[in-house]
Amino acid sequence: MNHANRFMPRLLAGLTLAASIALPLAAMGVWLFWDQLAPASNDPALPYYDPAALGAGARLAGFALFLTGALTQAYGLLGLRQTFLEAAAGRALSLLSVYGFRRFAWVSLFMAAFAIVQRTGLIALLSASDPTKQNALSIQIGTPELKAIFMGLLLVFVAQVFAQAKAAKDENDAFV
């Protein structure tokens, strides 16, 4: 692989590393600076609730819920980064590359479902903290959620094809 062909995987490896660091920091920042950031949110659920009413316990629960998601996404992105690094080194079909992409695919599928849990948890926390709207529970599964689940399934399928391509390459290499 020449230098020009190695540039893109290296660039993508850098971007995935930056994203895997930024995601947990952003999740922490939102919950640490809730009073400043929540009122400015464009989330359609928030106008129905008073974000300032969120108590310390609810903030801690929200922090844990969203940090869990961000760390899980970072874990998946680091797998994808491994795939990019392997490609940059000329080993696009290495075992590490296949495992890295497979990890990213499964994390993507998990996060599509976990995002529904996160949003439901946020609404439950906001509802429990707002005395005028207590006991509300909103579980949203619409087109965006279904698209994310479909994309997660698609990535898992591509990961399986990727693994089969590696097996075919290994078989061919054994004959040479």
Image: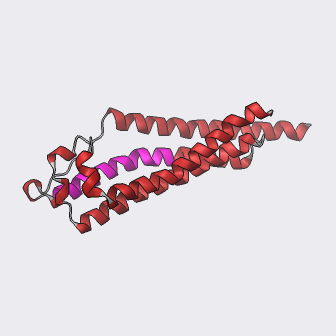
Q: Is 123 or 153 nearer to us in this picture? A: 123
Residue at x-position 13% and y-position 57%: 130
Residue at x-position 33% and y-position 47%: 116
Q: Quadrant of residue 51?
A: bottom left
Looking at the image, the residue that sits furthest to the left is 132
Q: Is residue 9 magenta?
A: no
Q: Is 172 or 123 nearer to us in this picture? A: 123
- Residue 81 at what x, y percent from top left? 62, 47
The span shown in magenta is 107-128
Horizontal placement of 86 versus 161: left or right?
Answer: right
Residue at x-position 41% and y-position 44%: 112
Q: Could you tell me which quadrant the C terminus lies in?
A: top right
Q: Is the magenta region chiefly helix, strand or loop?
A: helix
Residue 93 appearing in the image: no
- Residue 37 at what x, y percent from top left? 29, 51
Q: Quadrant of residue 121?
A: bottom left
Looking at the image, the residue that sits furthest to the front is 36
Residue 42 appearing in the image: yes
- Residue 122 at what x, y percent from top left? 27, 53
Horizontal placement of 26 versus 122: left or right?
Answer: right
